[in-house]
Image (spheres, helix red, strand yellow):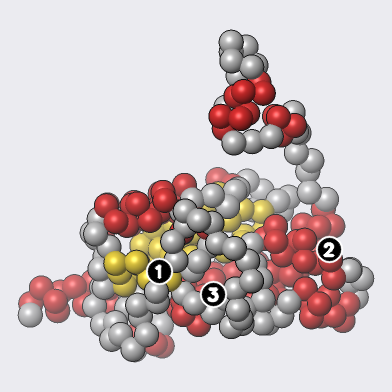
């Protein structure tokens, strides 16, 4: 992105890109193995105790024989993109260019495919690192319509997942997300507005507003991710893709009367077409 041979100075190039000049010369250091293992433990505990903050997680880790300070736990949680989930006042300033939209699903009967899609991001541990995983779920059928992996928490891989889902399955009526910057920025919101999709957002810190995809994260991690030790991103992508195929096509869900998400999704489409 920065071209040292360009006639425009490096300082000016950095200014145009909105980064500091020192960042141009920064060489990232690998994350210590101990931190990667600790992040995996934190991820497992977060699934079981989503209400636990850094202080509680520190105590839970110590019960497992892991001595770690609260501040270090908090640092790793920020890196992983997770926080204690509970209703609370927002004490931080929102980005002036990032609008927050109301939650549209309360008391809404969701009973047909492509009525509501949910998008969310979760942390995926690997053998020597980690990636972030974004999935698009059809709310009524629980079908995973598309997903992407990324090593950064930017909006582009969320937009790509959304675009693939639309290309393969059509345009939904509503898209629901949390209030993460990936979903409130102009790139993602612009894509929804372009397709005239109604925008719904969870309440701040309220995981229950997007509960079905939160449940999918737990299923994915216990049935796939925690059983593996991916060496590369491509290996993680291929293995997770195989699991998503199993989840969609062969894994029955009690909440769907023991049908698979595919059976529910396409079955509801047939009923809609016949109506």
Q: Report the Cα–Cα distance between label 3 and label 2.
A: 24 Å
Which residue is more in the foreground, 56 or 4?
4
Instruction: Answer whether labels 3 and 1 touch (C-beta < 8 Å).
Output: no
* Residue 97, visible in the rendered structure: yes
Write down the residue under mark 1.
Answer: 101
Nearer to us of marks 3 and 2 is 3
Quadrant of residue 114 in the image? bottom left
Quadrant of residue 91 in the image? bottom right
Q: Report the Cα–Cα distance between label 1 and label 2.
A: 33 Å
Quadrant of residue 5 in the image? top right
Left or right, 232 with respect to 103, comes to: right
SS for dot 3? loop
Write down the residue under mark 2.
Answer: 72
Q: Which mark is residue 204?
A: 3
- Residue 178: percent from left, percent from top: 49, 68
Q: Which residue is drawn at 57% across and 32% down?
A: 17
- Residue 35: percent from left, percent from top: 81, 57
Q: Residues within 10 Å of mark 1 (few under 14, many from 20)?
A: some
SS for dot 1? loop
Residue 221 higher or lower than 191, as above or below: below
């Amino acid at each position: 992105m920065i071209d040292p041979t360009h006639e425009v100075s490096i300082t000016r190039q950095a200014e145009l890109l909105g980064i500091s000049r020192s960042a141009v010369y920064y060489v990232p250091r690998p994350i210590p193995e101990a931190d990667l293992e600790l992040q995996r433990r934190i991820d497992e505990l977060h699934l079981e105790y989503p209400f636990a903050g850094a202080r509680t997680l520190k105590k839970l880790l110590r019960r497992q024989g892991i001595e770690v300070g609260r501040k270090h736990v908090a640092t790793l949680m920020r890196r992983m993109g997770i926080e204690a989930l509970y209703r609370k006042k927002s004490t931080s300033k929102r980005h002036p260019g990032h609008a927050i939209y109301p939650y549209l699903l309360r008391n809404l009967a969701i009973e047909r495919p492509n009525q509501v899609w949910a998008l969310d991001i979760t942390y995926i541990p690997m053998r020597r690192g980690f990636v972030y995983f974004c999935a698009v779920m059809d709310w009524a059928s629980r079908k995973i319509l598309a997903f992407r992996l990324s090593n950064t928490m930017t909006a582009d891989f969320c937009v790509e997942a959304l675009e693939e889902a639309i290309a393969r399955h059509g345009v939904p009526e509503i898209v629901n997300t949390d209030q993460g910057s990936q979903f409130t920025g102009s790139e993602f919101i612009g894509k929804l507005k372009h397709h005239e999709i109604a925008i719904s957002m969870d309440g701040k810190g309220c995981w229950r507003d997007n509960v079905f995809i939160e449940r999918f994260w737990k299923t994915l991690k216990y049935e796939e991710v925690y059983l593996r030790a991916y060496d590369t991103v491509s290996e993680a992508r291929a293995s997770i893709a195989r699991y998503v195929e199993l989840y969609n096509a062969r894994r029955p869900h009690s909440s769907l009367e023991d049908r698979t998400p595919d059976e529910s999704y396409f079955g509801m489409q047939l009923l809609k077409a016949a109506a």
